[in-house]
Image (cartoon, rainbow, N blue to C red):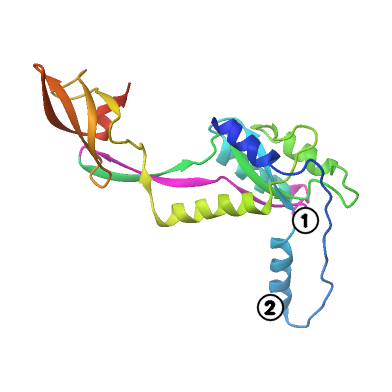
Amino acid sequence: MTVAETAQQLAESHVATYTSSHDVNNKTTNDPVGKQHMADTENSNKGRWYVVHTLSGQEFRVQETIMKRRALENLDDEIFEIIVPTENVSEVRRGRKSTTQRKCFPGYILVRMNLYDQAGKINNRVWYFIKETQGVIGLIGGDKPMPLSDNEVEGIMAQARGAEEASKPKVDFEVGETVTIREGAFENFEGVIEDVDPDRGKLRLSVSIFGRSTPVEVEYWQVERG
């Protein structure tokens, strides 16, 4: 399944109708700290999450642009949060292990906002603000975008939280898979993976040399899938 199909499923995997309602807590307090806590709590419960399609490679730029422009256009009370789901990936190259961030859904970001008003109609200010942001292609769902379900949002957030605590190999290889060696003494030889060592970023291959099966150890970056 492609990234686009995955994102499309996230946005369309629930009912095709949407109504929204917001409970406003008008309780007052003389405690300024209590007021701020109340405001933060209310803000965290506002809006629904939507999938926004962006130009590939411009996800973080779009995120930053929306965050800056929403204040300038007084939309802080309509657009609340923008995230680019990422995960940590590790790679061992020439004996050195490095960890980098990789986007979970390249070309897509998540925006928590009030896209619909109390009557269930599109909030035009928010709609055109998002669509006219440089780098944005559109919202998943066309002219009637559907918000993500709570389960979908929780799944994405859990993945992001897990990425902060652990990293996974940049490339996942499996035992029995056939790969081609692209660098080293056995360049252009094909081999079958017999063992995978993700901690060291190495593979043990069975390579046919002079008609005999010979074990060869290589690093991830020295091979490619056929």
Q: Which residue is mark 1?
A: 77
Quadrant placement of the C terminus: top left
Estimate the x, y position of residue 191 in percent, counting from the top left: 22, 25
Residue at 75% in and 32% down: 142
Instruction: Say what amino acid the circle numbered 2 marks.
Output: Val
Q: Which residue is mark 2?
A: 33
Q: CA distance from mark 1 to mark 2?
A: 20 Å
Residue at 73% in and 35% down: 141
Dot placed on the residue nearer the N-terminal end, 1 or 2? 2
84 in magenta: yes
Disc 1, disc 2: CB below 8 Å? no
Q: How many discs mark residues in the rendered view?
A: 2
Residue at 86% in and 49% down: 117
Magenta range is: 72-94
Instruction: Say what amino acid the circle numbered 1 marks.
Output: Asp
Residue at 23% in and 44% down: 200
